[in-house]
Amino acid sequence: MERGNQTGVGNFLLQGFTEDLDLKAFFFGLFLSMYLVTFTGNLLIILAICSDSHLHTPMYFFLSNLSFADICFTSTTIPKMLQNIQTHSKAITYEGCLSQIFFFIVFGCLYNLLLTMMAYDLFVAICQPLHYSVIMNPQFCGLLALGSWCISVMGSLLETLTLLRLSFCTDMGIPHFFCDLPEVLKLACSDTLNLVMYFVTVVPGVFSLSGILFSYSQIFSSILRISSARDKYKAFSRCGSHLSVVSLFYGTGLGVYLSSAATSSTRMSLVASVMYTIVTPMLNPFIYSLRNKDMKGALGTLLRRVVPLSIGTITGFS
């Protein structure tokens, strides 16, 4: 089967966890529960930030955007995987695969850029505290968020439109549970455009990681110059949650591509991808809530408001 820029000719086959039919119920329950935890946890983070005026600061503004990106990032892949597991199907249409790639890149790139913006926020707060309110004003933060969205959408659109020009050979099987761009490119008969797309994919990631590393180099340099041990601890603890998320995201992300390059084991690649696309977004709400007193307080207040409302609604119906 060959495909240029035609549509409606055949489907891709997602050969991930649908191969293990004996474990279908286990995988379905596991990934459904992980998705629900991710969705609920990140939604609570967003609602808590919106409902508490004390959290209307640049850091929590970027965190709410990060939580929204988490929800959309997982919603791009997990529902289709659950559908395929439940129906014993492997098929995803050509159009569906392109849509999945587009949104996966949008929210993956957005996630990268938001982590960079949060690192910059920490850099200004720790290295230039006297100018923090002037530099990180609401208008500037809004422009940073808007710019991150625009870059993510434009970059993803460029890659998806380039993908439309590729021709695919006979084998349409993807050894994955979603349309991962590197795996899809392996099925293409053309190599020239592949190199272009890899370049467009890698550059934003390198830019974001470089920005984060530069920010932290300045942060650690400033912290080491602090004489008080207590103040040093407070400064380090301020970076703890963000640094944990960055390590988890980039560690698992790099692990996916390094493992796929170092070994041909499909199972290892699948496990690494689950860590990158499902486990990391699920853990982020716990990292930011368990290590943050303000966030725990806002979540407690939100839940105390919701529970009496739910009880009142049930009582009214009864």
Image: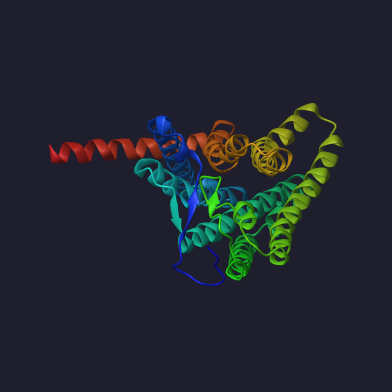
For the point 40% across and 36% down, which residue is it? 28
Foreground of the two, 42 or 183: 183
Q: Quadrant of residue 291?
A: top right
Query: Is 25 displayed left or right of 98 in the figure?
Result: left
**Furthest residue to the left?**
318
Q: On the picture, is 54 further left or further right than 305? A: right
Q: Nearer the viewer, residue 279 or 125?
A: 279
Note whether 3 is above or below 256 in the view shown. below
Residue 218: where, in percent of width, then height? 83, 45
Residue nearest the observer in this picture, 92 or 189: 189
Quick one: quadrant of the C terminus? Answer: top left
Of all residues shown, which one is farthest toward the top?
A: 229
Residue 79 falls left or right of residue 227: left
Quarter occupied by residue 307: top left
Residue 255 in the image: state x and y as whole percent: 69, 39
Q: Write the residue at 72% across / 65% down.
A: 196
Q: Percent x, y for residue 146? A: 59, 64
Which residue is nearer to you in this view: 71 or 29?
A: 29
Q: Determine the residue positioned at 57% across, 59% down.
A: 106
- Please determine whether, in this image, residue 158 is positioned above or below residue 276: below
* Colour option used: rainbow
Q: Residue at x 33, y 39 (%)?
A: 306
Instruction: Give the mark count.
Output: 0
Position of 233 compared to 313: left or right?
A: right
